Image: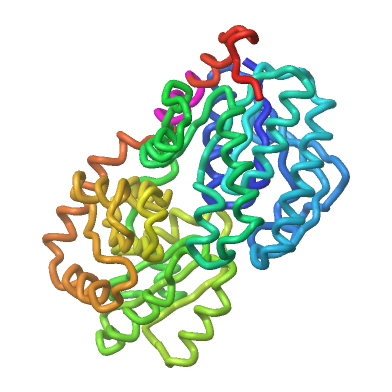
Amino acid sequence: MRILFLSDNFPPEGNAPATRTYEHAVRWVRAGHEVTVVTCAPNFPEGRLFPGYRNRLRSVETMDGIRVVRVKTYITANEGFLKRTLDYLSFMAASVAAGLFERRPDVVVATSPQFFCALGGWALTRLRGLPFVFELRDLWPASITAVGAMKRSLVVRMLEKLEMFLYRSADAIVPVTHAFRDELVRRGIERGKIHVVLNGVDLSRYAPAPRDEALAGQYDLRGRFVVGYLGTHGMAHGLDTVVEAAQLLRGREDIAFFFAGSGAQRAHVEALVEERGLGNVRMIPRQPKEAMPRLWSLCDVSLIPLRDSEVFATVIPSKLFEGMGMGIPALMSLPQGEATRIVTDTGCGRCVPPGNARAMAEAIAALADDPQALARMRERSLKAAPAYSRDQQAALMAQVLEGVVRTPASQRQTA
């Protein structure tokens, strides 16, 4: 099977869409499929080109057997609605143009969270008479209104119409949570073409490891109970609450908060930490993906917060699975939903109400003071991890793609 995959994030970028796409694609290649990924020059989230890359009209490289075609786009930081929209539109146009000249694939996959990439996938399949699979990573635009980036308006209503058009046009939809599937069915999308493939963890990379003492010394974390937040510092993550929890625990010299990453809210978080004089907080910049297991090894607890919005009850943050693979208990601060059920059912961590800094601080202190409970959560995390292995999830998605390819053109969706 020849797969053409459109994604505006791909390694060496290390965010969740880039990681998922790469870890699926490399497994498809190992299974004998031909995979081409059309993406842009790596720049997320700062909007600065990674070393060794240029924003060229077109460049081609091979990464672990994956053919990677990078196209020229408008590059900007992951902040500001207008500039980000121009970024998305430029990738949509460039990816369609590049896809027209690629060897004819059997199927085209385009991924969200934003829908302009998916719209490019749809356009390419219609121009070339190919099946279209929509990988749904976010209920956009609901998520951007949930974080206050946009208010209800004519633009949002137009985006919602585009959203529904793409759902109806896709030959198959691959959401990353069951809650997304249920929401689509509620909105009238045929259940039979929706195939859930959860996020997961590469267990060959994320496995239990002793604390990296060199890094612990470098960041003054030796002998401390480390609460780790590793990932994008975005508007959705409610990091003000984490800073407030750190302030409540500033008297506990044995507890430290460790932030690693970047994003639209990074400068805001840094300013809050400095303003409040929080010596129990360590903040380091975004790190390469290959460094993440070493960083995770520093953490006693993985902190997974999101803002208190109904739309975030439908998501499952991918860092939950990385923590599982390393045996790191989760402290989840999300609206009750699919992610909190995983934590509760597996016993791999604890959940506190979103936006409640005191409840977060109390849970952290309780875990720091109860090593036996923490050890039980570690064991349960490791026991649960194989059910979310990336090997399993990649195989499930390949089955979906093969099913679409086998479906006669006359039976595919039309729009």
Instruction: Tell me how the rendering is colored.
Output: rainbow
Q: Which corner quadrant holds the C terminus?
A: top right
User: Looking at the image, which residue sits at the far right?
Assistant: 57
Q: Position of residue 271 (x, y in %)?
A: 53, 85
Q: Position of residue 185 (x, y in %)?
A: 41, 33
Judge from the rendering whether residue 193 lies leftward or rightward of residue 329; answer left or right: right
Q: Position of residue 379 (x, y in %)?
A: 19, 48
Give the quarter of the image for residue 59: top right
Query: In the image, what residue occupies the spot 48% across and 26% down?
Result: 397
Query: In the image, what residue occupies the spot 54% across and 79% down?
Result: 268
Query: In the image, what residue occupies the spot 42% across and 69% down?
Result: 238
Give the quarter of the image for residue 149: bottom right
Q: Using the image, determine if residue 228 lies above or below residue 346.
A: below
Q: Position of residue 333 (x, y in %)?
A: 31, 63
User: Any magenta on residue 370?
Assistant: no
Q: Nearer the viewer, residue 316 or 326?
A: 316
Q: Using the image, determine if residue 380 lies above or below residue 120.
A: below
Q: Nearer the viewer, residue 279 or 75?
A: 75
Q: Using the image, determine if residue 390 lies above or below residue 415.
A: below
Q: Nearer the viewer, residue 221 or 284?
A: 284
Q: Which corner quadrant holds the N terminus?
A: top right
| Residue 75 visible in the shown view | yes
Bounds of the magenta segment: 391-399
Mostly what secondary structure, the magenta segment? helix
Q: Using the image, determine if residue 132 lies above or below residue 330.
A: above
Judge from the rendering whether residue 173 lies leftward or rightward of residue 48; answer left or right: left
